[in-house]
Image: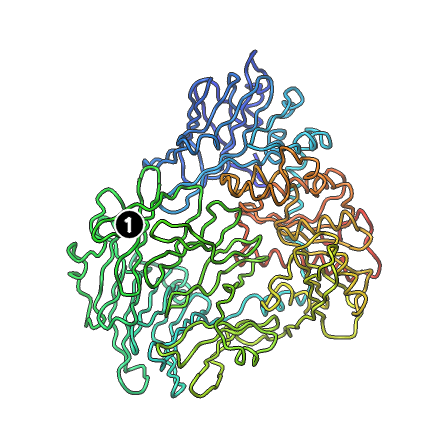
Amino acid sequence: MFDYQGRRLPARALACAGVLVLFAATAAAKDDPAALKPGQGLLLVAIENSAAAWSVRIDGDGGDHVVKDLVSGRNTRLLKLPAGTYRYSRADRSDDMRFSMDRPDNRARFTFTVEPGVVNYPGELVLRMLSPHRISGGRFNRAAFAMAMFDRDAPGARSRLPWRTDAGAPDPFPEFLASKVDAAGMARLVESSGADARQTREAALAPDFAAAFKDLFVPQTAAMWPQISPGGDFVAYKEVRPNQETAVVVDLASGESVKIMTVAGVVESVLWTGDRSLIVGFRKTLTGILAQSPGKKSFKPSDAASGIELVRLRDGALRDDALERVRWPDVTVVDALPDDPERFIVMRADEDGARHLFALDKRASGYNPLDFRPGRRLDGDWKDKTLLRGFVDGKGAVRAAIVLDDPKTGTLALMRRDGDAWTKLRELTEVDLYDPVALSFDGASLLVRTDEGRDQTDIVRIPLDGSAEDTVLSVPGVNIVAATIRTRDRALLGGYVYRAGTARLHYAEGDAGVPKALAASFPDAHVAVVDASRDGRRTILDVHAEDAPNAYYLYDATKRKVEKLFDVREPFVRAKPARSVALAPSGTDGRPLDAYLTLPAGAGPFPLVVMPNAAGERYAFDPTLQLFVHHGFAVLRVGNRAGADVDLALDAALAKHPIDARRVALFGVAGGGHAALMRLASSPQRYRCGVTVSAITDLPLMFSASVWNARPAAVARMKRLVGDPASDLDLLRANSPVYQFEKLTQPLLIVHGTEDMSVPFEHAWRLRSLLANAGRPPGWLPLPDADETLSQPADRLALHAASDRFLRECLTAPAATGGNATPSGL
C-alpha cells in the first residue's frame, strides 16, 4: 500500500474471528473481497493510529471483533459481516491504558451500519495522544482517499460492489467522484500523487529566494518575554539563538546587561520573584548539546536536565560576579509570587512520578531535599488521582487543579479547592481541548484555551463557583494556539494564531491600556502594555507595525519619556518591508470593505497577489506578504466578506494604483483558500492563477471530517453559517469548489498538511483527484505530518519555496498563461 506521498506503507497482516481479510493486493488474489454471502456486507476498517494502540474492539449485531496488531500510522482491514448496526467500543494499549468509545455520550459518534452487498466505509477511526495520560479518538470522513486506496489494493472489487459512506453526515462526493473517475483512474491517482509531489518539491528555486526567505522568516537572534522587576529598576528577557537560549538582565539606570544563564536547549521561564531576584526555568536538550559539543560521542541522561535557578542580584552595580544562585533540579515554577518576600510555588514529581505543589524559600542558600517531603505538600494527598497542573492565587493559596481522574480511560477533571477538600467542578473528556492559561489574581476564575462547544479554539474564562463561562478572546476562523498574560496582574494580553505557518499575537480587545497621547507617538502601529512596575511608574510597551516586527519600549510616566529597549529580532539584511494603504470600496451590501494594498518599490505597473480573508490584522508584520513585495508583487488583502467583494476590492485597486490587470493571482489560506477557488471558478478572466493553503474545498465534507463534528453546539453554529447538509445540500454543493472543478481552468497550486484536523487533508485530495483526472493536474504539495499551523520550519520553507516559484512563473510571463496549463516548474 502507498500513502499520498507515494511511499510504501508497512504490511498489515491479521486474522480476526475468521472474517478479517488482509487489505493488500496480494491478499485479494487469495480471498476475493467482493465474494459475499447473502446478507453480508464488506466493512472497510481504516484506523490511523498515533496513540500506540495495539487493538480496537468492534461490537455489533454480527458479534464482537477485535482488530489486533495495530502499527503506528494507517491500518486497514476488510471484514465480511452480517448486515446490522456496529460501533467501535474500545482501543487498548499494551500498557493497560485504554480509550473507551462505549460511554453513553460517546456511542453515537462511533456507531455505524453495515448494509449487505456493498462496501461499507464508516470513516477513519483516528486515535491520537493528547498527553501522556490521554487518548483522543474520533471518526473522520476520508472517503475519497479510502476509495482510491481500495481501488489500488483490491482491483476490480468496486466494479462488483457499490460504495457506501456512513460517516455521520450526508456526503454526495463519493458518488460524484465515481461518476467522473473509474476504478483504474482512482488507482492511478495514488501513484501520480507521489510523483507530482516530488516534482513540486524538486523544482529549481529562484537564485535570490533562499536569502530573502532567511532574512524574513529565519532571524538568527530573537528577543522575547521582557519582564520589569517589581521595583522598576531592571528588565529581564530571553534571547534565542540556534540551539541555545539565554536569560538576560538589564540595569535600566546604567544600561549594563548581564547574561545570567545560557542553556543548550530552552529557557522555559524568566520570572521576577522580588525587586532584585528572579527565577529562570530551563530544559537542556540533546539537540542543543550536540550542536555545542560536536566532538562528544556519549551522553548521560543527566545531560538533558531540567529545573529552575533562583538568581539574586546583590546590592550595587549589576555584574557577573555579583550574582547569588540556587538551583533546584526537576522542578517547574507554578508562581513566582513577586510580592511575597519569603516564598514561591513550584511543582515536583516524587520517586513514584506523582506530582505535588511545594513552597520554596526565596532566601534559601542551597538545595534541600527535605523541602519536598510529604508533609510540605500544598495540594494534599490525591490517593486515586494524579495531579497534572496546580494553580494558586496571587497570595500563593492553592485554589484549583487539573487531575487525571481515571488512569485507564485518561479522563481528566477540573478540581476546586474548598478549604482542605477538593471538589470536582467538571469532567474533561477527550472530545474537547482544555488547556489552562492562568488563574486570576483573586483565584475566582480560570482562563483556559478550549474548543469545547466551538468550531475553533478560543480563550474562555471559567468561574470556579460554577457560574456561566464567557469568551475572553476569539479570532474568527482561526485557532488560538497559545496565550500570553501580564505577570503583574495576570491579565490576558493576547493569543497567538498561525497564518500560513507564521505565528502572530492577536491582542485582547481593549486591553492595550495605553494613554491616547502615548499611542499617538506610534502612528500606524499597535501599542500594548506588556508589563509594569509595582507603582506603575515604568511600563514596558510592545510596539509593532506591518513593516516592522515587534520592538519593546520603556515608558517612564514620571519623566513622560519613551525609550526603545530592544527589537525582537536583528535588522533585515536585504528586505525592505513596506506599509499598506487603506482602500474603502463599497461591498455588495453597501458597507465599506476592509481592503489594504501594499506596493513594492518602483513605478509599476505591478503584478498583484490578492489575499482573500486576510485583512483582519493590518498592523501585524506578515513575512509572507513582505516576501511577495520583496519580489516585486503588489499585495491586496481583503476582509472576510462575500466572494464578489474580492472583485470589488480589485476594481478599487486597479482604478487608482499602478497594477497590471493582466497579471493578477490569488493566494488564500483555509477559508481564504475557499474564497480564492470560488473566484478562480467564477472569474477566470480576471485571475491568472491561484495558490491555496489548507483550503476548504467541499462544504458538506466539513460536517463529517472536522474535529468539531463531535460538539453539537459547534455543528449547530456551522449549520447556521453555511447551511445544513440534510436540507441545504444543493446550496452547499453550489458553493463548494470540488463541484465546480470543471470551471477551474487556471493554473493552481494546492498546499495542505496531511495532519490538519481543522480543514482535513481530504479537502485537498478531493480537488486534486478531479483536476488530475481531467488532465489539468495542479501543482501539488502535501506536507507530511503537518497540522493546520504549518509551524515547523521545514513546512514553512516548502510552502513558500513552492508558492514563490509558482507565482513568479505565473505572474512574470508577458501574457496570460493558457487555460489548461500548469506553470512549467510544477
Image quadrant where residue 282 sits = bottom left
Count of numbered marks? 1
Residue 347: % across, % down: 27, 58
Q: Nearer the viewer, residue 10 or 126?
A: 126
Q: Please indicate whether residue 644 sits to the left or right of residue 431 in the image.
A: right
**Residue 35 image offset from top left, x and y in percent:** 58, 16
**Residue at x 51% of width, y 28% of height:** 45
The residue under the point 43% across, 18% down is 63
Whether residue 139 is visible to the viewer of this picture, yes or no, is yes
Residue at the spot of label 1: 387
Q: Amino acid at mark 1?
A: Leu
Is 495 situated above or below 420? Answer: below
Q: Is residue 460 above or below residue 213?
A: above
Nearest to the observer: residue 515 or residue 139: 515
**Residue with the most extreme front position:** 467
- Label 1 residue SS: strand
User: What x and y, as percent, mark residue 242?
Assistant: 46, 67
Q: Is residue 320 left or right of residue 49?
A: left
| Residue 166, above or below 271 | above
Q: Quadrant of the N terminus?
A: top right
Residue in the image at 63% along x and 59% along y:
800
In which quadrant of the rendered view does residue 637 lie?
bottom right
Q: How is the image coloured?
A: rainbow
In the rendering, at what x and y percent does residue 158 appear? 64, 24
Q: Furthest-right residue in view?
A: 815
Label 1: how many residues lie within 10 Å, few (<14), some (14-19) or many (20+)? many
In the rendered view, tell whether residue 470 sits above or below residue 119.
below
In the rendered image, is residue 333 in sight? no
